[in-house]
Image (cartoon, rainbow, N blue to C red):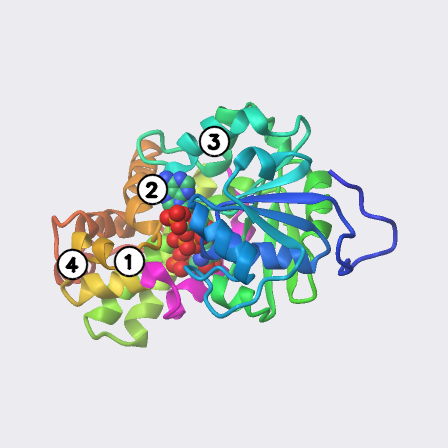
Amino acid sequence: MTEQPAGTARPTEPGRFGKVAVLGAGSWGTAFSIVLADAGNDVTLWARREEVAAAITEKRENTDYLPGLTLPDAISATHDVQAALAGADVVVLATPSQTLRENLVGWAPHLEPDAVLVSLMKGVELGTLRRMSEVIHEVTGVPSERVAVISGPNLSGEIARREPAASVVACTDEDVAKRLQLRVHSPAFRPYTSTDVVGCELGGAYKNVVALAVGMAVGLGFGDNTTASIITRGLAETARLATRLGADPLTLMGLAGLGDLVATCSSPLSRNRTFGEKLGRGMTTEEIYASTRQVAEGAKSCSSLRALAAQHGVDAPLATIVDEVVSGRMTAKAMVDITLARDTKAEKD
Ligand SMILES: NC(=O)C1=CN([C@@H]2O[C@H](COP(=O)(O)OP(=O)(O)OC[C@H]3O[C@@H](n4cnc5c(N)ncnc54)[C@H](OP(=O)(O)O)[C@@H]3O)[C@@H](O)[C@H]2O)C=CC1
Ligand SMILES: O=C(CO)COP(=O)(O)O
């Protein structure tokens, strides 16, 4: 990865750094490309559909995912993954969590030998129960010291409009995290480093499940006491599993934990909260899937997080009931009744 020149904490000049490939031109891949461009990187954004890449090239706009927003000149788009990866010392992955593995199989042979791989994804793989950084390491063989995660309260529409926000850049190798931090530090985007990859990834995946539950409560017509109770117990559940898997509890109190939980659960922009709201109003999962092409990771990760918790003997009532509702085995109203009727216990347990 390109070294940061000494004494420049806030790189903003165009073309200051090397090339970054962003694989996935959905809402977050596109919005994060703006951050990268503003931070001084040359960005090549790979789009799965040729017409999305063509629209970005011709109109300077991602009409499907960020309509009305002009992209900086430092972003170019392509449908050719080999061209996107050539010369990229940083590769940012922004696909749906459940397709990452199959995507990487095709992409891995084209990676530059020392590239740092960065996951923007917030999900846990169904079946294997792997976190995204684990999938990346497994498929590409890239050592975990070169696999990083960026996670925090980062709703893509707000980031794309350059509203101020902070996030966490996590890598087990702190030097890599620091170098990446400089590469993504734009005037509107403030990154903090961490070595707690497990905490950041589980915080990001779990908050989507909690946002589904909050959305269901909102859809059922409940107010702030209900949503605050779900958010708080959701954080307790997240921390229970994450710390069992080795996370630092403080990570869950930080941007990638509480920060993202608050943003996602409070925002009507959140796809997960919106998905939950529709369930709360009585729509079925199939009807909701048919109404949008956008990914709501929690609708799949509720099942993998539930299984992961069970595998490690961790109590996960929220993931369990969200999974039951999403799978159609229980209504959102029944979810509330069952949650409240469970055996009582101490708050700290
Ligand atoms: N949006 C946000 O605010 C944030 C999202 N994230 C995370 O980022 C990840 C990506 O989400 P986001 O960009 O928002 O999702 P979107 O729903 O906005 O876009 C999904 C993207 O994935 C592509 N895609 C769909 N199916 C496949 C496939 N089989 N193989 C490869 N690519 C595919 C889509 O391409 P096509 O258009 O051709 O279907 C599209 O580019 C998720 O894990 C999400 O949780 C994290 C932080 C913020
Ligand atoms: O991760 C996000 C904000 O940090 C985006 O949340 P949604 O996927 O629910 O829109």
Q: Position of residue 321 (x, y in %)?
A: 21, 51
Q: Which residue is mark 3?
A: 104
Closest to the observer: 76 or 19?
A: 76
Q: Earlier in the sequence, mark 2 or mark 3?
A: 3
Which region is colored magenta? 246-273
Q: Which mark is residue 341?
A: 4
**Gap in Å between the C-alphas at discs 2 and 3?**
22 Å
Q: Which mark is residue 292?
A: 1
User: Helix or strand or loop: what does disc 3 sit on?
Assistant: helix
Residue 173 relative to residue 6: left or right = left
- Image depth: mark 2 or mark 1 in front: 1
Residue at (44, 33) in percent of width and height: 103
Q: Position of residue 82 (x, y in %)?
A: 57, 33
User: Helix or strand or loop: what does disc 2 sit on?
Assistant: helix
**Gap in Å between the C-alphas at discs 2 and 4?**
22 Å
Count neighbours of disc 1 (C-alpha within 10 A) and say few if under 14, some if 14 to 19, many if 20 or more.
few
Residue type at mark 3? Answer: Leu
Tell me the quarter of the picture where residue 129 sits. top left
Tell me if label 3 and label 1 are in contact, CB under 8 Å.
no
- Image quadrant where one finds the N terminus: top right
Closest to the observer: 198 or 38?
A: 38
Q: Earlier in the sequence, mark 4 or mark 1?
A: 1
